[in-house]
């Protein structure tokens, strides 16, 4: 498409030159001595000739370079198309003003910086064959008017989306740009997502909506991108303006589990009125390096930890974490703690200022909030992730191992309207596994505080006796009638151990315990599921995108029907926060 446009542009340029030359020749008979009061000096005539020659030469040079660039681009495009299946990622954009294309270019550049192979294309350049040959596709799509595709995407809609498609091997994600003031908010992005699902493609993560370039939503896209690409160190596109919080408490919830350790972390705001948030919102945390690693690097470089350096690369984090210094300066030790640490050999001999100029800030980490403001502290639930060498990851290592109790934590609350709860008069089915119980617990706490008891929780983990996170609170809610029903699914044998539940809860049908996974428990409760959905219940899913989320989606479509599930998606009754 764009190659044809370039060819037409070159032809137009030559035609314009021929027309102008013809006009000049037609006017030549008018230019005789009778038109001139005095003939121009000979020198000026030669100067005019030189200017004309220079102009023609410059024009010819521009056209020659444009033609050479076009040939090079066409050759590159042809080579790229010939190896359509060789790239790890295909990054597509559908842009009306150029903003979606800019974000797509940033996305592709981020993947390449992480050692991934990524091709960048306009949506109009793509056909079904290219999509079928791709492994993973990322689409950044804007919406115009009331849910309409941008002009450059019209050909794709007409020629590709109107045909039956089968893309069972494709993994995808969609970044939808829009304006929340319009009724069909991010409409074209949702249209693309529904088409890909219908074609059998699998989501890498759920669609991300961006309201008027919201930087927090774009950071959310970057977070998911880093997880999907196994490159969680990708830098944030925009700095996070953290607030000051204090680590009030920390406890391991599952000692002895065969899974990775799960910690509950409690955070308190520093001073003043406590910040407000809603169930479903996200905590963005600014992690730090282990103090011992920072000290070892400074010792190896023979640098004074207190030496002041410019902190512009991570502006806004110094005050939020309680460090000293002005808004523009901080200590080199503090800056190192908030940055990717270089190898000592790569920075040997540099002074503190030169070292600071090379540092790249650590990106934020995202965690579902497990509590509501009325409960006081903010509660997070996170799994302690370990690298191949056994050392903890930067984010979970900071909160689970290195941050001192009573010490500072940099945190920002991100509003997540896509996972806000439904009207409290509507029944709610909450489904999740692992640390996904964090977001579900917040919804339960919020609804119970509002006096709503039509709540059904379905939760799965490994061991009944070690991995029933928040088990005592959930059992108390069941006993008080704040939970209408509780289903628990455990995938590993627990040597006869059972979760602690209120007396008689299993016998009187208030609770059921299942062997296997969450989706198996949901299938076993097909009749109850159908009845709740018929009653108007909303379904919220939180937890693992691998296995659990697609398994649950499959059961929902089997029991309710794909048309029913799609209708629930359209009216917001089916929402997911999966990772």
Image (cartoon, rainbow, N blue to C red):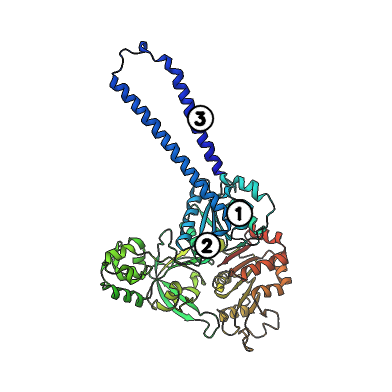
Where is mark 2, residue-wise? Answer: 416
Q: Quadrant of residue 240?
A: bottom left
Mark 2, other Cα within 10 Å: few <14 / some 14–19 / many ≥20: some
The numbered mark, 2 or 3, whose residue comes first in the sequence reads: 3
In the picture, the disc for residue 462 is none
- Compared with residue 158, is residue 106 higher up or lower down, i.e. above or below? below
Tell me the distance, in whole angstroms, between the alpha carbons under discs 2 and 1: 34 Å
The answer to whether residue 194 is above or below residue 291 is above
Closer-to-camera residue (514/100): 100
Q: Which residue is mark 1?
A: 130
Q: Residues within 10 Å of mark 3 (few under 14, many from 20)?
A: few
Q: Residue furthest top?
A: 34
User: Residues under labels 3 and 1: Cα distance?
Assistant: 36 Å
Q: Which residue is mark 3?
A: 15
Residue closest to the eye, 137 or 44: 44
Looking at marks 3 and 1 on the same chain, the residue that comes earlier in the sequence is marked by 3
What kind of element bears circle 1?
helix
In the rendered image, residue 401, in percent from the top left (x then y), is placed at 42, 79
| Residue 30 location (% of width, % of height) | 42, 14
- Residue 93 showing in the rendered view: no
Label 2 element class = loop
Marks 2, 1: nearer the viewer: 1
Q: Residue at x 34, y 27 (%)?
A: 50
Residue 551 quadrant: bottom right
Asked if marks 2 and 3 touch (Cβ < 8 Å), the reply is no
Nearer to us of marks 2 and 3 is 3
């Amino acid at each position: 498409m764009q190659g044809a446009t370039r060819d037409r542009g070159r032809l137009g340029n030559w035609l314009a030159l021929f027309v102008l030359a013809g006009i000049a020749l037609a006017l030549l008979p008018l230019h005789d001595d009778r038109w001139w009061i005095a003939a121009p000096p000979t020198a000026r005539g030669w100067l005019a000739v030189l200017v004309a020659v220079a102009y023609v030469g410059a024009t010819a040079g521009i056209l020659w370079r444009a033609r050479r660039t076009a040939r090079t681009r066409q050759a590159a495009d042809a080579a790229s198309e010939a190896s359509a299946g060789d790239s790890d990622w295909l990054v597509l954009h559908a842009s009306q003003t150029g903003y979606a294309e800019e974000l797509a270019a940033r996305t592709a550049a981020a993947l390449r910086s992480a050692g991934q192979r990524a091709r960048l294309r306009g949506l109009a350049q793509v056909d079904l064959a290219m999509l079928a040959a791709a492994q993973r596709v990322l689409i950044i799509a804007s919406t115009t008017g009331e849910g309409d595709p941008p002009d450059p995407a019209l050909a794709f809609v007409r020629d590709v989306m109107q045909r039956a498609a089968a893309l069972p091997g494709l993994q995808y994600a969609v970044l939808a740009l829009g304006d929340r003031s319009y009724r069909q908010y991010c409409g074209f992005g949702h249209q693309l997502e529904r088409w890909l699902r219908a074609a059998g493609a699998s989501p890498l993560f759920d669609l991300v909506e961006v309201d008027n370039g919201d930087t927090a939503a774009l950071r959310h896209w970057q977070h998911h991108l880093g997880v999907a690409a196994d490159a969680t160190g990708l830098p944030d596109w925009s700095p996070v303006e953290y607030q000051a919080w204090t680590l009030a408490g920390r406890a391991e919830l599952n000692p002895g589990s065969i899974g990775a350790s799960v910690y509950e972390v409690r955070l308190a705001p520093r001073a003043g009125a406590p910040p407000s948030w809603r169930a479903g919102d996200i905590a963005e945390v600014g992690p730090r390096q282990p103090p011992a690693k920072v000290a070892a690097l400074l010792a190896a470089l023979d640098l004074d930890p207190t030496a002041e350096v410019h902190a512009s690369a991570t502006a806004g984090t110094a005050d939020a974490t309680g460090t000293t210094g002005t808004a523009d300066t901080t200590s080199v030790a503090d800056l190192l703690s908030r940055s990717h640490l270089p190898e000592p050999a790569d920075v040997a001999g540099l002074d503190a200022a030169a070292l600071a100029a090379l540092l790249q800030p650590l990106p934020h980490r995202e965690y579902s909030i497990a509590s509501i403001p009325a409960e006081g502290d903010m509660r997070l639930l996170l799994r302690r992730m370990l690298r191949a060498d056994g050392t903890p990851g930067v984010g979970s290592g900071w909160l689970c191992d290195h941050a001192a109790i009573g010490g500072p934590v940099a945190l920002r609350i991100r509003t997540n309207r896509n996972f806000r709860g439904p009207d409290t008069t509507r029944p709610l089915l909450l489904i999740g596994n692992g640390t996904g119980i964090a977001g579900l617990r917040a919804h339960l706490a919020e609804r119970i505080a509002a006096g709503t008891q039509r709540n059904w929780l379905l939760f799965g983990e490994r061991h009944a006796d070690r991995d029933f996170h928040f088990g005592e609170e959930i059992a108390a809610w069941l006993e008080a009638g704040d939970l209408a029903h509780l289903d628990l699914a455990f995938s590993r044998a627990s040597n006869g151990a059972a979760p602690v539940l209120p007396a008689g809860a299993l016998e009187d049908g208030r609770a059921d315990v299942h062997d296997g996974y969450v989706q198996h428990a949901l299938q076993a409760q097909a009749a109850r599921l159908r009845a709740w959905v018929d009653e108007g219940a909303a379904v919220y899913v939180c937890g693992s995108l691998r296995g659990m989320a697609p398994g649950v989606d499959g059961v929902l479509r089997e029991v309710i029907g794909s048309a029913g599930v799609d209708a629930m998606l359209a009216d917001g009754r089916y929402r997911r926060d999966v990772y």
